[in-house]
Amino acid sequence: MILFTSLLMTIYIILTQGILFTIRRLQKSASYYKKTNMLFVSNLQAKGNSHAHVIYLLSILLLAIFVTTSVLYSSYYNVEENTEAVYPYSFQYISHPNNPIEKVQQDIEFMETTLEQTEGDFDAYQSAFKTDEDRRIGFMSNTNFNALGTHEALTLNDNEYYVVAGNAGIIPNTDAIQDYVDDPLQYVGLEERMILVSGFRAVYYVIPDAIYEAIHYPEYHVFAYELKDWTEKRDVAEKIESQIMTEPDERYVSSKISLYVDELFVKRIMFFIGFMLSLIFLSAAMSILYFYLQTSLAEEKEKYLGIRKIGLSMKEISAVVTRELSILIFVPFTMAAMLLFTVLFSIRDTLSPAFFQMTTVGVGIILLLFTLSFFIIRKAYFKKLVE
């Protein structure tokens, strides 16, 4: 809250002082006495405070629009990438040590038969790992690790071990393996990408085959399948999951296809909410500007009527009004866009290219809408001003 309040106060101070600074610079410039510049600067000076308040409110609303479009819109386009980060396979079947071998064979036969009938071409992987249930630590042999298909093959020496994260986005403990071996092992690297479904175990230690055989913990068997164009295989996922579902202490079944479908539905709702919020904030911004112009219309109309009597042409009045409206509309837009891209640039290492792409597109669309609004408001306001 302190940071947010400080940001609002900083924006307000920059806007008010910036307008005062601009007025002084314009008054001292060589072009001050040319054409309608003196009238324009005088108007700006007379309405400096009220203009600053309106520009400040419009800047905050536009910043809210930009944040909404950036966060909600871009998330809609990262669903596939985020899904693969937590569920690496189209289908994954993990058999509990207590699961009868006959049931495992029946389930696997059904899955592979279904995939052969519906797809024909798919990649199959079979592996295994042992686990300390109390500490949620998995142990995987070098051979079993290489049997999975989401990473490059690994070769370990007899005294080395490799660490694989068990939860997406969380760096695991890399030293706990030393509690399970007699002779210390040498750490050789970390794999942050998931090799099995995220959250099933806190960490996996990949160790030489001989050490793996010497560890006495229950062994889980893994069957994984990967399909081409998996985002379009919703029917296949529904057919398999209608017959084979997760049963605690027996089997754990997961599919990135189903997760993708569910996440896509949620993101589409968020996309709609983001679109509606953008329209609401945009409407609020235009309403503030419209009512601000309406409250001063009678006074401005009388002022320009007097100026026309001393010889100012309609073209010159139009130029002054256009410049004043340009400040009220495009200064807030520029201010909000600068703040947005400054923040994004400062955290660019944590953002995906899609985020920047969608932000740029969103800002461009809003600029187009603002430009269209500018011409509409200018035409309507000028017509009322001189009628």
Image (cartoon, helix red, strand yellow):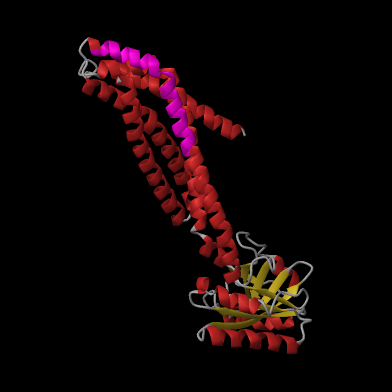
Q: Mainly helix, strand or loop, the magenta region?
A: helix
Q: Which residues are magenta?
A: 282-308
Query: What residue is drawn where x is 51% and y is 72%?
Result: 232
Q: Is residue 326 left or right of residue 197?
A: left
Q: Which image quarter is the N terminus in?
A: top right
Q: Which image quarter is the C terminus in?
A: top left
Q: Residue furthest front?
A: 387
Visible residue check, residue 63? no
The x and y percentages for residue 6 are 56, 30
Q: Is residue 96 left or right of residue 61?
A: right
Visible residue check, residue 282? yes
Query: What residue is drawn where x is 38% and y is 28%?
Result: 328
Front-lying residue, 374 or 139: 374
The answer to whether residue 327 is above or below residue 32 is below
The x and y percentages for residue 260 are 57, 66
Give the quadrant of residue 23.
Answer: top left
Query: What residue is drawn where x is 46% and y is 33%?
Result: 285
The x and y percentages for residue 228 are 49, 77
